[in-house]
Amino acid sequence: MLQLVFDDCTRMALCLKQVFNKDKTFRPRKKFEPGTQRFELYKKAQASLKSGLDLKVVVRLPPGESINDWIAVHTVDFFNRINLIYGTICDFCTEKTCPVMSGGQKYEYRWQDDHKYKKPTKVAAPLYITLLMDWIETHINNEDIFPTRVGVPFPKNFQQVCKKILTRLFRVFVHVYIHHFDRVTCMGAEAHVNTCYKHYFYFVSEFSLINPRELEPLKEMTERICI
């Protein structure tokens, strides 16, 4: 039995290495166009992350920069990073293992959109996350919401849209931490996932982008690793 567990962990560790090294994600990675202001902001944010600075400092708006550009860059980046995290465990998140999108017995998330699911609907976790990522991609690819052309302003509801995106992305963290963190740990990815979560938490807290009630499912863990 121990040998089987060891073999399983070894296989997943190799898979993890391949996933992280090749930037394989659950959904195609979204990239910023070189030469744009947002690309420069993205490079600045990545440089700060790699510098070893306190994450609480890293998330602060750089002097002279637009807050909407800063939020746009991070919203897309968190979409990419959470895709990467979920991509490492998605083979173990199935309709059989996760028939409901939940965070333990206390928290259940139902899907709703403006198309097929007009009322909150109970769906399996992998379907919920597929619908979520499709929904986010539609928004971040929409020039009316995330404009990429120079001089085109953000819409008045831009931050509200980002709040909804970031709130729903948090639910992926909840599901991964509560239902699949044994796999993450077995793959040796715990530090990576924790760092991504801390970055996310400090960012949404810095700009009040998520209702504190939404953070309740991971409150104890957040107090342990973030505060």
Image: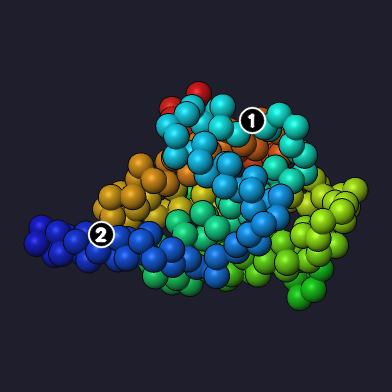
Number of on-image labels: 2
Residue found at x 69% / y 51%: 38
Residue 106 in the image: x percent, y percent? 55, 46
Pair 1/2: label in front: 1
- 43 relative position to 185: left or right: right
Q: Residues within 10 Å of mark 2 (few under 14, many from 20)?
A: many
- Identify which amino acid the numbered label 1 is placed on: Arg
The residue positioned farthest toward the bottom in the image shown: 116
For numbered disc 2, what is the local secondary structure? Answer: helix
Judge whether 122 appears above or below 38 on screen: below
- 25 relative position to 192: left or right: right
- Residue bearing the label numbered 1: 60
Q: Is residue 111 visible?
A: no
Separation of marks 1 and 2 at Cα, in angstroms: 34 Å
Q: Residues within 10 Å of mark 1 (few under 14, many from 20)?
A: some
Q: Is residue 156 visible?
A: yes
Taking depth in this image into account, of 21 and 213 the one nearest to the observer is: 21
Taking depth in this image into account, of 63 and 49 the one nearest to the observer is: 63
Residue found at x 81% / y 68%: 114
For numbered disc 1, what is the local secondary structure? Answer: loop
- Residue bearing the label numbered 2: 13
Residue 49 in the image: x percent, y percent? 49, 39
For the N terminus, the quadrant is bottom left
Residue 63 in the image: x percent, y percent? 71, 29
